[in-house]
Amino acid sequence: MFALEALISQETFCLSKVSRTIRIGCVDNAPYSIFPGIPHFILARAPGIQLKFEELKGNKFEKVQRSELDFFISPIVKSLPPGFKSLNLSKNEYCLLARTDHPLARTGEAVSDAEICRYPFIDIRVGEPQSSCRTLREEAFPRWKNARSLVISPYFLPFVPSLETCDCLLVAPRKTSEKLILRYGITEVKTRTPGKVQIPRLIWHEKTDKDPLLQWFRSSLLIVSTTDSMKKN
């Protein structure tokens, strides 16, 4: 904290006067669930900064290395190439969503893998479309890999309203799910098999590691994501 104060107190770096765009690659629910408070946090301290969120297409590491992105966020990257650094954000737990009167949700009891796999899924794609198509369902609940995908999408939010009117199921991060349940006629289905826990990581290249603004932004993102997590707990 002392180092951060010294950093932003330098005459050459004044947050209130900085005018710059920070480009972040992530899936559509990351700002929604991991750090919803970041616009307010940035606006109050560095009103000249623009945050530009971009879809994760192509080779994410190459885009960061070529300075096409400043950061990207991923919960599924297991190892980093040489020259890259990362910061762990708040953890992701996964759960199963369905309409409130779905047959699996009516009893309120935890349901088995076999019962779940009888129903089609709205699946979220992870990885590149030209590669072997992996879904979040398979990543978070490997025992459900043989279930049918009715829809495969790179986006969470467009198909959530569809859950209210059909028997489809959706796997989503718990923080995202809690917000969606408040807005739509959907609920969490209790499952006997627990989902995996993943840690979203903020990833950047070492060539921007000492950039004063990006150092400050990394710290800010960690503060906001941790604060939001603590509020939930």
Image (spheres, rainbow, N blue to C red):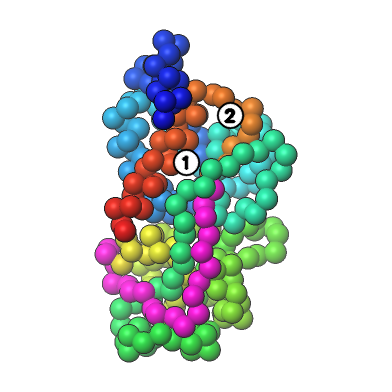
Q: Magenta segment: does it hold 192?
A: yes
93 above or below 53? below
Q: Nearer the viewer, mark 1 or mark 2?
A: 2
Amino acid at circle 1: Phe
At which x and y percent is residue 195? Answer: 50, 71
User: Secondary structure under badge 2?
Assistant: loop
Q: Which residues are magenta?
A: 182-201
Q: Which mark is residue 53?
A: 1
Classify 10 Å Cα crowding around label 2: few (below 14), some (14-19), many (20 and above). some
At which x and y percent is residue 73? Answer: 53, 46
Question: In the rendered view, does 157 fall on the left or right side of 45?
Answer: right
Amino acid at circle 2: Asp
Q: Is residue 35 visible?
A: no
User: Secondary structure under badge 1?
Assistant: strand
Q: Is residue 67 visible?
A: yes
Residue ID at (35%, 67%): 161
Give whichever of 169, 92 is nearer the camera.
92
Question: In the rendered view, does 66 fall on the left or right side of 44?
Answer: right
- Give residue 9's quadrant in the image: top left
Quadrant where the C terminus lies? bottom left
At which x and y percent is residue 67? Answer: 61, 30
Residue where numbered disc 2 is placed: 209
- Give residue 2's quadrant in the image: top left
